[in-house]
Amino acid sequence: QVEIVESGGGLVQPGGSLRLSCAASGNIRSIGAMGWYRQVPGNRRELVAAVTRGGIPNYGESVRGRFRISKISANNTIFLQMNRLKPDDSAVYFCYLAPGPSVGETDYWGQGTQVTVSA
């Protein structure tokens, strides 16, 4: 079993910053990518940022230039630095781990961490 644990969410004022952490542990056979999605109740889950095992990042259009995702560390942890936050960034942020293609497993997801941007 693989466990995904997120931390770092909270309340921040518009224009502020937050740093989310995501740690994966357990029976991890291979990692293809890790990243973050976010979701507001009633809306679809939206890609925030992801990074491949090789360190190639990908960002959602709405956060590009403001958020930065780290590389995957040796202990299977990633960080999401969120700057110049806006009220529209308020959501539950979910971390995921996509196993390598040869493993034949589905993605693993964390429970989510709430980010609220409000004055």
Image (tube, grey):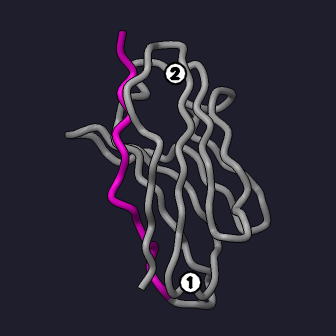
Q: Position of residue 33 (x, y in %)?
A: 63, 66
The residue tagged 1 is 28
Q: Which residues are magenta?
A: 105-119
User: Could you tell me which secondary element the residue under label 1 belongs to?
Assistant: loop
* Residue 60 in which image quadrant: top right
Toward the viewer: 44 or 75? 75
Q: Please say whether residue 63 is one of the residues in the magenta stretch.
A: no
Give the vertical position of 82 relative to 95 (above or below): above
Three-letter code, disc 2 = Leu
Q: Position of residue 119 (x, y in %)?
A: 36, 9
Q: Residue at x 44, y 61 (%)?
A: 5
Give the vertical position of 4 relative to 18 (above or below): below
Three-letter code, disc 1 = Ile
Q: Seen in the image, is 37 located left or right of residue 90? A: right
* Residue 102 in which image quadrant: bottom right
Circle 2 crowding by C-alpha within 10 Å: few under 14, some 14–19, many from 20: many
From the image, which quarter does the N terminus lie in? bottom left
The residue tagged 2 is 85
Disc ID at residue 112: none
